[in-house]
Each structure stands twice: as C-alpha cells, then as structure tokens.
Image (cartoon, grey):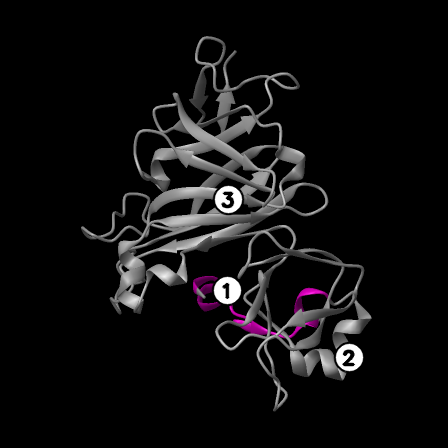
Amino acid sequence: MYKVYRDGGSIIRPLFFEFPEDGNTFNENTIDSTFFLGDALKVSPVLKAGVKNGDKFQSYFPKGEWADLNNQTLKVSSNGQNIDLESSFTSTNVHLRPGKIVPYQNPAQVGKTKDFEAKPITFLVNQDESHYADGYTLVDDGVSSTTWDKQAFTFWKIKYSVKNINSWIEYGDSEYVPQEGNKADQLEEVRILQAENLADTDFACYIGKDMIPHEITHTYNKYSKILSLKPVGQTTVSFKDIAAIKFGNSQKEPNFCLTSLYSYSVDKDFTINNNT
C-alpha cells in the first residue's frame, strides 16, 4: 500500500498488470474472476451464487509454482491454465506469487486490527524457478496521520537469493523505533515454502549489525516441505539488527556462520563484505 501511495499505481490489479506477456490474462472471464492484491498475492474469490462449502471452481493461474496461503503445505503448479480450487465458507483462496516475499501473521491469533501491532512478523518466501524472491514490509505506528511528514516509519526491501536473505531501508528514518508494545519491526521467523532444494540445510545464522554471525535455528519439515529459520535464545530480533541471513549445507558450500573462518565488515555503500 505504501509503495502505491508513493510511486502511484493500483493496490487491486487485474492479472494482466503483472503478466502482460500472458495473453490469457486478458480473457474476459479471467479479468472478472480473479485479481492481484499488490504485486504478490493472487486472490480467487467465489463469485457464483449457490456454490456450497467444498465445491470446486476454476481460476486462471499464470505459469509458475503458486503457494497456498491458507494451507502453506500446498501449491498450485501451472503452465498457464485454469486450476480447480475448493470453495470455503471461512476463507478465500489466496496464493503467493512465485518469486515473492510477504510479511505474515496468523489470522487465528488476532481478533482486531490493533492486535497486529502486538505480534511479530513472519516472512513467507516463495522462490521462483531461479531460486529468487523479493518483497517489502512497512514499519510504522499504524494510526498516525503525520507518519509520512515526520518520517516516523521505515519501508524495508527484502531479497532472497542463493541461500542468502538481505534487507535494507528504501524510505523512512533508519533510527525509527515503534512505540512500546508495537512489534511490527520484530522478526519471529522466515518460512521458505516448497523448499525441497533446501532440505539438506545444516547451518544458519544472521549477520548482526555488529558484523558477527549469530546462530538461528533451521528446521526442514519433509512433509510440509517448509524450511523454518528462527532466532536462537530469543523469540524475535529487530529487522535493523540483521544485516543478512545466511544458510546452507556445509558439505557443499562454505559455512559462512563460522566465526573462526569468516569475519565481516560494511563499506561506505553499506555492502557486507566477507573479509576472509
């Protein structure tokens, strides 16, 4: 929403806004039956009268592997085709686009908008075929009308590539801290969906702003195919205390989390350098 506010555009978008090269997205039925929320979330509502809970209906998906946000163990694999989805009286079909990252909070744990401020953030990552993904998250107090004028916010860009997660502030005040009790700047977990290519991960850490690797837990679930990365020794860590997250398999690639072998520094362009 902030990116649209700043750069212009539309929050709710027809599929051809994001996939203009796919002629099927210009189909009248596609335009009328499904849409994007921002550039990452495809929403497939039930629009026909008389549809019952559990009934099947079709929705068009451009080519790629789309992660189901209601059941994150599932995915839609499409070659650019209509896919059967199941209707529900309690939720709407929402899928995360290939190559995108979104901030996420469990809706079952919140009852009203204010509750979102008291919960830390989980990032959901859906890799594209080149194992890349990116996204954004906004940190502010959620209520003030003068937030933008006072620069009382941070707008973060998050990028995943080659078993490495980086984030940086695109807009806002780098020193901004939300009011006490607001955990919008706290990372609880990074959840990489459909992560079969990362099943053999045996090390993970985040490089802190002190340029020292800090251990994080890594858990791959072979049934859900989700790789979970969480801070160790604390429930959350602030975004601005994380310079990068690194992970991998030490039998195949260097273990960048070993302080005995690697040290890091930041140059004048805020690029993290491996000094080894």
> Which residue is depicted at the point 70% across and 71% down?
16
Badge nearest the viewer, 3 or 2:
3
Q: Residues within 10 Å of mark 2 (few under 14, many from 20)?
A: few
Badge 1 is on which residue?
A: 7
Q: Tag 2 or tag 3, which sits nearer the N-term?
A: 2
Quadrant of the rendered image containing residue 116: bottom left
Any mark on residue 191, and which?
Answer: 3
Label 1 and label 2: CA atoms lie apart by: 28 Å
**Label 3 sits on what residue type?**
Arg
**Label 2 sits on what residue type?**
Asn
Q: Residues within 10 Å of mark 1 (few under 14, many from 20)?
A: few
- Answer above or below: position of 170 versus 269: below
> Which residue is depicted at the point 34% across and 59% down?
109
Counting from the top left corner in percent of width and height, residue 118 is at 26, 55
**The residue tagged with tag 2: helix, strand or loop?**
loop
Badge 2 is on which residue?
A: 27
Label 3 and label 2: CA atoms lie apart by: 34 Å
- Answer above or below: position of 18 versus 276: below
Left or right of residue 189: residue 101: right
Residue 198 visible in the current orientation: yes
**The residue tagged with tag 3: helix, strand or loop?**
strand
Counting from the top left corner in percent of width and height, residue 37 is at 54, 69
Instruction: Tell me how many marks there are.
Output: 3
Q: Depth check: give the residue in front, 179 or 32.
A: 32
Query: What's drawn in magenta, residue-wise?
Result: 2-19
Q: Tag 1 or tag 3, which sits nearer the N-term?
A: 1
> Which residue is depicted at the point 55% across and 23% down?
202
